[in-house]
Amino acid sequence: MKMIEAIIKPVKLDEVKSALAKIGVEEFMESAIYCHGRQKGQAIVYRGAEYVANLVEKVKLEVIAADDSVGKIIEAIGNIAKTERREDCRIFVLPFVEAC
């Protein structure tokens, strides 16, 4: 068993969900997260002063899958969410031992 964690742009979420449903993935966890990194975020005007938000909103998907379906899941997510910018889609595969 493996845990697949994908960090994607929020605008790609519905398309990724549809792609996962097409390959039979019905259960996964979804979380709104904020990332700090190369993407510098956006300038925000608050009470007349401009602030730079160093955080970028992303969505984290977590899927528990059998070893033989990991490749299909990574391909489904990557085909939709990946762009020329590496930080737009990060996919991690971790060993998954047990759930209670």
Image: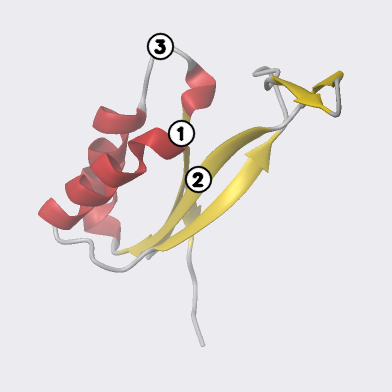
Q: Earlier in the sequence, mark 3 or mark 2?
A: 2
Q: Are marks 1 and 2 in contact (CB under 8 Å)?
A: yes
User: What residue sits right under mark 1 in the picture?
Assistant: 9
Residue 10: which quarter of the image? top left
The kind of residue on which mark 3 rests is Glu
Seen at 24% across and 37% down, the residue is 75
At x 35%, y 43%, the residue is: 13
How would you rate the neighbour count of disc 3 (Cα within 10 Å): few for under 14, some for 14-19, many for 20 or more? Answer: few
Cβ atoms at labels 3 and 1 below 8 Å apart: no
Q: Amino acid at mark 2?
A: Val
Whole-angstrom CA distance, mark 3 to mark 2, is: 18 Å
Q: Nearer the viewer, residue 31 or 85?
A: 31
97 left or right of 44?
left
Circle 1: is it few (<14), some (14-19), or many (20+) Cα within 10 Å?
some
Residue 57 vertical position relative to residue 26 in the rendered view, above or below: above
Q: Which numbered mark, 3 or 1, is in the foreground of this view?
A: 1
What secondary structure is marked by label 3? Answer: loop
Q: Position of residue 97 (x, y in %)?
A: 49, 72
- Kindly identify which residue carries mark 3: 84
Q: Nearer the viewer, residue 53 or 79?
A: 53
Which residue in the structure is indicated by mark 2?
Answer: 59
The picture places residue 18, in percent across and down from the top left corner, at: 19, 49
| Residue projecting furthest to the left | 22
Disc 1 and disc 2: Cα gap in Å?
A: 6 Å
Disc 1 marks a residue whose amino acid type is Lys
